Amino acid sequence: MIENFIGDAQGRMDKSVETTHEHFNSVRTGRATPALLDRITIDYYGTATPLKNLATINSPEPRMLTIQPFDPTSIKQIEKTILESDLGLTPSNDGKLIRLPIPQLTEERRKELVKLVKQMAEEGRVAVRNVRRDAIKHLEDLVRNGDVGDDEERAAESRVQKLTDEHTAKIDELLRRKEAEIMEV
């Protein structure tokens, strides 16, 4: 029974680390990658739809993204949403294709991006700690119901804490690498 709780906690912590990594990929570092646009959702006929579901996104050059919508009537909405996003990019369209030049990052913009990435990392750590809190609460409930003893609970709590420390360290490592990538000129 305790193994189930610990296995569930580990799965949820893994998911938190994975989600944090995905968020990091959506932060631009001066290189053009379609993952930059993963966070962009377009209001498509009243439904918030991820951009990657509405268009083909390519990187024909190291500093250029192209977006070719499946529905040409959505091109204005896509352009407007990208302009309003926190990416700091200016799209240009020729009626069929949106070109998204990726400018060199200024030192000031790099520092803003590092702050953003640190905030994302903290959200990931909080998610991992919330999983730990839930797991420990479940273990305490098991002790209260008489399903497990105090010794088993303490051993399980220390395993959950060890998992928490490991996953937090993974997020810290991802943060360190992303910071280095952003600050690289």
Image: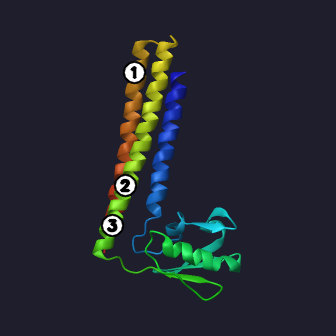
- Relative image position of residue 99 (x, y in whole percent): 54, 83
Cα distance between the residues tagged 2 and 1? 32 Å
Say whether disc 2 or disc 1 marks the residue closer to the N-terminus.
Answer: 2
Image quadrant for the C terminus? bottom left
SS for tag 1? helix
Residue position for label 2: 119
The three-letter amino acid code for the residue at tag 2 is: Gln
* Label drawn at residue 43: none
Q: Position of residue 160 (x, y in %)?
A: 42, 30
Residue 65: x %, y % from top left: 53, 78
Q: Nearer the viewer, residue 140 or 153?
A: 140
Query: Which mark identifies residue 155?
Result: 1
Task: Mark 1 vs mark 3: give the one in front.
Answer: 3
Crowd around label 2: few <14 · some 14–19 · many ≥20 (10 Å): few
Q: Is residue 181 above or below residue 1?
A: below
54 relative position to 2: left or right = right
Q: Is there CB contact under 8 Å for labels 3 and 2?
A: no
Marks 1/3: CA–CA distance: 42 Å
Q: Residue furthest bottom?
A: 94
Residue found 35% across the figure and 45% down from its top: 169
Q: Quadrant of residue 45?
A: bottom right
**Residue 113 versus residue 44: which sits nearer the camera?**
44
Please say if the residues under marks 2 and 1 sit with CB atoms less than 8 Å apart: no
Secondary structure beneath dot 3 equals: helix
Q: Nearer the viewer, residue 169 or 138?
A: 138
Q: Which mark is residue 112?
A: 3
